[in-house]
Amino acid sequence: LAKLAKRGEKFDIVILDPPSSSVGKKKKRWSVRNDMDELVALAAPLVKKGGLLWTTTNSASLTPIKFARSCERGFSQAGCSAKLERIQPMPHDFPTIGPQNVKNIVWRLK
């Protein structure tokens, strides 16, 4: 993402669908719960003004409100302004028992 930003790339939509947790090349642990704001901060500058940043996670331990707040922190860190465009539920042909773990939040960059 940093390389794309350095080249000045801009997109109409950027989709962020990271794993709930992962271990990177440098053995650093990454998790949606702790690091989504950093990912949003890297991705937000790549979205054209008026474009969309689609954020999604299937982390069961993260509530939709905490996920949204983490994304908002990322916009703030990037110096970008965004408004909540849509909370997209899972389709009807994707049944679940109990609360849905998948959170899909779409943001429009100002």
Image: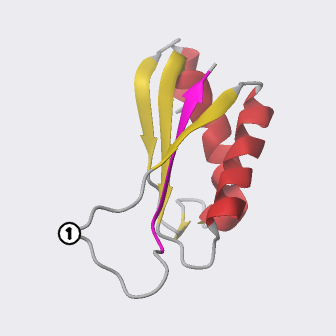
Q: Is residue 107 located in the magenta-colored stretch of the structure?
A: yes
- Residue that appears at 52% across and 59% down: 25
- Residue that appears at 42% across and 41% down: 15
Residue 16 in the image: x percent, y percent?
47, 46
- Residue that appears at 59% across and 24% down: 109
Residue 4 in the image: x percent, y percent?
49, 23
Apparent side of residue 28 relative to residue 78 in the rendered image (left or right): left
- Residue that appears at 47% across and 15% down: 9
User: Which residue is outermost to the front?
Assistant: 92
**SS category of the residue bearing label 1:** loop
Residue to which mark 1 is pinned: 93
Give the residues in magenta.
101-109
Question: Is residue 107 shown above or below 58?
Answer: above
The secondary structure that dominates the magenta segment is strand
Apparent side of residue 41 relative to residue 94 in the rendered image (left or right): right
Q: Name the amino acid type tagged 1.
A: Asp
In depth, the one of 12 and 22 nearer the eye is: 12
